């Protein structure tokens, strides 16, 4: 009888980073057992079924979710930053409820490559810790998450972000600069305008490609940035690039000469591809990847520093192209060993 797995996460919203994590997770599960029966909870079930060749249940049809969990052997929660309330308490409660259901039905639970916290609500902190203690295996993708759980007597396995495992293309620069933006509370119109000024000033004769990594939330800010560029230089014809799959992103990024990126996974793919990359620091995870590779960052709350930093970036040597990323891989062996114990 085929082993049954349900996967819970921020899937079906067409967010590149989360979809890339899901693709690596599914690949690894099939390496473990080619006949494994996978069901993904998704907000776009048809897309998820077609893209990953899995079963899919609508994340918000709770009775269908309950039925799927009741009939599964294992729930995998993750990856991503699911267990935190900085973005939304509602989303944290939802993901905790899914874990609770698995515990209630006495199913095995795996927490996969997650960033844990911050959790500001004391009640939700206690619920989170109580439920995580029921998990058979927990892996986290950063030391802050590890230390957070260790304070409560939980010892997770440290892992690298699974997106490091995606295959990238050899760079083939075509006179393009990529700009990847997302909507965020600290992002101001002043920052967007001054960034547009610097891109026009320091990257003349470059085509500008603007990437919304999640169209539903990023498109508006990308469109505003495009408008600023056009107002500064009527000859500039920026292209807003909508990519539905990881392969489309990888192929497009490989044509860039430089990348200014906000989302963590945009920075990751740029770095791994060997593109000269300038992160926009809106979150500690972006600060960390920038520090790991000695990259300067732009600060959304410091628009006064944009001109100097972009100028230096435009003339700096690209040291990323010389790096060997062989050791930057999600190590499947520990996860596979955990699955063997569970099944």
Image: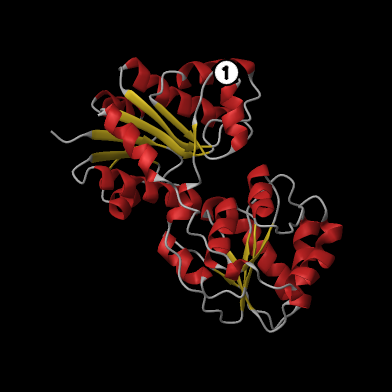
Quadrant where the C terminus sits is top left
User: Would residue 161 be seen by someone viewing this image from the given angle?
Assistant: yes
Q: Say which quarter of the image contains residue 67.
A: top left
Q: Residue 174's x, y, as percent?
A: 56, 82
Which residue in the structure is indicated by mark 1? 152
User: Would residue 54 be seen by someone viewing this image from the given angle?
Assistant: no
- Residue at point 73% right, 68% down? 228
Question: What kind of colouring is applied to the model shown?
Answer: secondary structure
| For residue 238, above or below residue 121 | below
- Residue at point 61% right, 28% down? 147
Quadrant where the N terminus sits is top left
Q: Residue 322's x, y, as percent?
A: 59, 70
Front in this rendered view, residue 147 or 305:
147
Q: Residue 138's x, y, as percent?
A: 45, 30
Q: Residue 251's x, y, as percent?
A: 46, 70
Q: Say which quarter of the image contains residue 319.
A: bottom right
Front in this rendered view, residue 165 or 6:
165
Q: Count the numbered circles shown.
A: 1
| For residue 118, above or below residue 246 | above
Sort mark 1 into few (<14), some (14-19) or many (20+) by Cα contacts within 10 Å. few
Query: Quick check: 336 left or right of 282?
Result: left
Instruction: Name the element at disc 1.
Output: loop
Q: Say which quarter of the image contains residue 51.
A: bottom left
- Residue at point 27% right, 33% down? 340
- Residue at point 67% right, 43% down? 284
Front in this rendered view, residue 167 or 246:
167
């Amino acid at each position: 009888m085929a082993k049954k797995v349900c996967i819970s996460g921020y899937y079906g919203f067409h967010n590149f980073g989360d979809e890339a994590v899901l693709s690596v997770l599914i690949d690894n599960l099939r390496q473990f057992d080619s006949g494994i029966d996978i069901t993904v909870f998704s907000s776009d079930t048809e897309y998820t079924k077609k893209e990953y060749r899995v079963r899919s249940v609508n994340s918000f049809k709770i009775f269908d979710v309950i039925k799927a969990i009741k009939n599964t052997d294992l729930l995998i929660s993750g990856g991503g930053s699911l267990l935190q309330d900085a973005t939304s308490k509602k989303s944290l409660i939802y993901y905790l409820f899914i874990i609770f259901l698995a515990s209630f039905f006495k199913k095995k639970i795996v927490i996969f490559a997650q960033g844990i916290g911050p959790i500001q609500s004391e009640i939700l902190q206690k619920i989170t810790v109580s439920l995580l203690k029921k998990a058979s295996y927990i892996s986290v993708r950063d030391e802050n998450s590890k230390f957070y759980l260790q304070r409560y007597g939980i010892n997770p396995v440290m892992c690298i972000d699974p997106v490091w495992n995606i295959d990238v293309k050899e760079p083939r620069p075509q006179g393009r600069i990529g700009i990847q933006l997302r909507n965020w509370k600290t992002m101001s119109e002043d920052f967007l305008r001054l960034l547009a000024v610097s891109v026009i000033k320091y990257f003349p004769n470059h085509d500008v490609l603007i990437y919304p990594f999640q169209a539903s939330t990023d498109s508006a800010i990308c469109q505003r940035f495009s408008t600023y560029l056009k107002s500064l230089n009527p000859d500039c014809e920026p292209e807003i690039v909508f990519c539905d799959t990881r392969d489309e992103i990888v192929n497009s990024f490989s044509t860039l000469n430089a990348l200014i990126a906000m989302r963590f996974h945009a920075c990751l793919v740029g770095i791994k591809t060997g593109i000269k990359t300038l992160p926009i620091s809106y979150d500690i995870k972006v600060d960390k990847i920038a520090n790991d590779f000695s990259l300067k960052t732009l600060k959304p709350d410091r628009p006064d520093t944009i001109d100097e930093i972009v100028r230096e970036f435009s003339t700096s040597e690209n040291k990323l192209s010389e790096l060997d990323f062989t050791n930057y891989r999600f190590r499947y062996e520990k996860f596979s060993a955990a699955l063997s114990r569970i099944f």
